Amino acid sequence: MTAEFPRVAPEEFPKRVNVGRRVFIGLAALGALGVAFGNSVQNFVGSAVGSGLGGLLPGGDRFRIYSITGAFPKITRDKYRLKVSGLVDQPTTFTLAELQSMPKTSFTKAFQCVTGWRVPDVHWEGVKLSDILDRVGVQSSAVAVSFDSYDNADTESLTLDQAHLPDVIVAYSMLGAPVTTEHGGPVRLYVAPMFGYKSLKWLSGIRVVDSVEVGFWEQNGYPINGWLDGTTGPNNPDPELT
Amino acid sequence: MTLTQTPARSLRVLRFDRVQRGAHWANALLFFTLMFTAIPLYFGSFFGIVMPRHVIEMIHLWTGLALPLPIIVSLIGPWGKAMRHDVRRINYWTRDEIRWLRSAGKTKLESDKFNPGQKLNSIFIGASILVMLVTGAMLQWFRFFPVPWRSGATFVHDVFAYAVFFVVFGHIVMALTHREALRSIFKGWVNRSWAERYAPRWLREERLDDVGP
């Protein structure tokens, strides 16, 4: 090599191989391919090796834990209360045991965050929100349902129609075990047909109201109706709300 | 290109000028901030101890947006001559360097200012800045992208983050075990004897013995 490149000046560099540029472009192209097809690859790998193993892969199938306040409200299972109030015939406060004694609904569905991460095959168990609403008796002037959290920060809302969907539940079990504190336990909302931010954690209160109250994430710019498919949804003819 | 103006000037060779050292440490500071804030954002159970998630998110976002600045600022303008020169050195490889890398360091090599491993490190860091910036922006301004792309961007951002942790860790281990090279990113110079051993081709091609004050 000494003979081949005696005292090479910078302008003679191009005689060599521009490995740097190639590797750089190659890595950038990998990144672009990953953005375009990473979702499909992940779904394929997840279904091939099972979501348990899939969760171990970087980026794959894992929950990102959010909290607005930066802390997790800790409520023991004994002390937990769900207060249902507003335009109802019988304002009621439920204990966890009372919720668990009501008809049980369980299903397995993915948890999809609006920012992109997704956890497939999450097992959920709880009470249909519609069962709770039927129990307390919704008055005819009611239009929407508002939700409050034990973190005193998060709020959510659903129209009455949305609240009656069969896969909108007040969940006390998740991933085959009682809902953990970081996932919003002992009791959280799970709105299966919508993005994760609609599934309020540490559910403390359900208020039946006469207009849709804009929730925390919606005040921060997220769609009021967070339908997963990005449409206006089966029960919402008003595109303005999406 | 130049020698430092020490009495024993012929014994010391400038490896990184002020602009390069400044760019390196600004870049390192941004990387560390991003990596430290990434941990609680990725592993949820870590956060909430020091500050709320949205504060960590804001730090991560603004640090990320600033990430390309040290390299861009150090490359452009009249002060970026040494930087641009080194980028060319990192870009152009001899056949020997490619062979050396393929054989995992077993073939003989008259080493350049940076060996192929060091070159790969900087190429990777450069590319990861671009990839992390683009995918990070997609995660922040997700409304403009379809949901599968958001998932893909999350995937890429995570995979590259894993790689960055791995590479930065390796970079630090190598730096701590090569003290003379490490000193040059603080003080700029290396001993000529070091360059003769670790970067002979650089010494020869740059005519480092011919120029200088």
Image (cartoon, coloured by chain):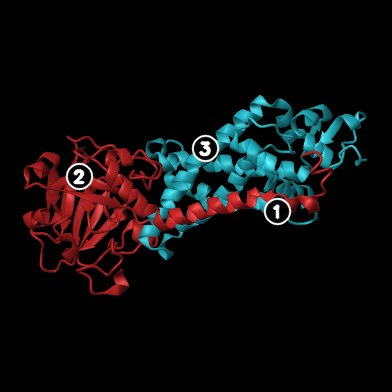
Q: Which residue is mark 1?
A: B73
Q: Residue at x 89, y 37 (%)?
A: B209
| Residue B131 picture location, percent across and down | 53, 52
Same chain check for tags 3 and 2: no
| Residue A113 picture location, percent across and down | 33, 53
Same chain check for tags 1 and 2: no
Q: Amino acid at mark 2?
A: His
Instruction: Describe the element under mark 3 as helix, strand or loop.
Output: helix
Q: Which residue is mark 3?
A: B165
Q: Chain of mark 2?
A: A
Q: Amino acid at mark 1?
A: Val
Q: Chain of mark 1?
A: B
Q: Chain of mark 3?
A: B
| Residue A241 picture location, percent across and down | 30, 70
Residue A217's image quarter? bottom left
Q: Residue at x 83, y 43 (%)?
A: A6
Supply the letter of whichever chain is red: A
How far is the residue under mark 1 from the one under mark 2? 51 Å
Whether A161 is drawn above or below B189: the answer is: below
Q: Which residue is mark 2?
A: A123
Instruction: Describe the element under mark 1 as helix, strand or loop.
Output: helix
Q: Residue at x 57, y 32 (%)?
A: B170
